[in-house]
Image (cartoon, helix red, strand yellow):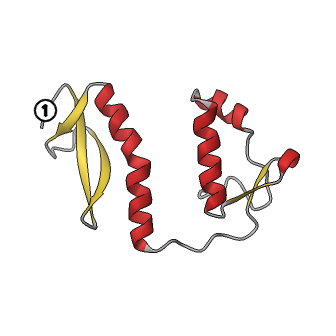
Amino acid sequence: MATGLLQPGERVPTVRHLADSLEIAPGTVARAYRELERRGAVVTDGARGTTVARRPAPPAPEAARKLSLVALLRPVAVEAFHQGFTAAGGDGAGHSWGEVRGGRVTVATFQKGQVG
């Protein structure tokens, strides 16, 4: 939607189809679709499926966007930890993610096997 690949009124993939193609749990896709619907980005119409909303949702206030960012990034950080990645120094050689603390967005770099 954000890239313009899906136009307003166009159907989004079914939960099962998207979960299979991304190799993730269907519940994860269903939660994402519910969040998109809550934000007004998609509309679900029972048996007709889910479509891209015809008009864009108004942007959320900055504080809400920051909280949303933290909620989106927390599972990524947890998964990185479980895969053996730890917060590392800012040398730019690893993968970055952001976190909001005290109203400021910070970026941490993760590298496998390093403790930073």
Q: Is mark 1 on a helix, strand or loop?
A: loop
Residue at 29 percent across and 31 percent down: it is 81
Q: Which of 5 and 79 is in front in this view?
A: 79
Residue at 59 percent across and 58 percent down: it is 2
User: Is disc 1 surrounded by few (<14), some (14 to 19) or many (20+) residues within 10 Å?
Assistant: few
- Residue beneath disc 1: 115
Residue at 61 percent across and 35 percent down: it is 27
Q: Position of residue 94 (x, y in %)?
A: 25, 38
Q: Nearer the viewer, residue 42 or 27?
A: 27
The amino acid type of the residue labelled 1 equals Val
**Relative to residue 17, is residue 70 depicted above or below?**
below
Q: Where is residue 67 in the image (x, y as percent from the top left)?
A: 40, 61
**Relative to residue 32, is residue 40 depicted above or below?**
below
Q: Position of residue 59 (x, y in %)?
A: 54, 72
Q: How many labels does the image show?
A: 1
Which of the 4 image quarters holds residue 105? bottom left
Quarter of the rendering occupied by the C terminus: top left
Left or right position of 11 against 38: right
Left or right position of 84 against 115: right
Quarter of the rendering occupied by the N terminus: bottom right
Q: Where is residue 52 in the image (x, y as percent from the top left)?
A: 73, 57
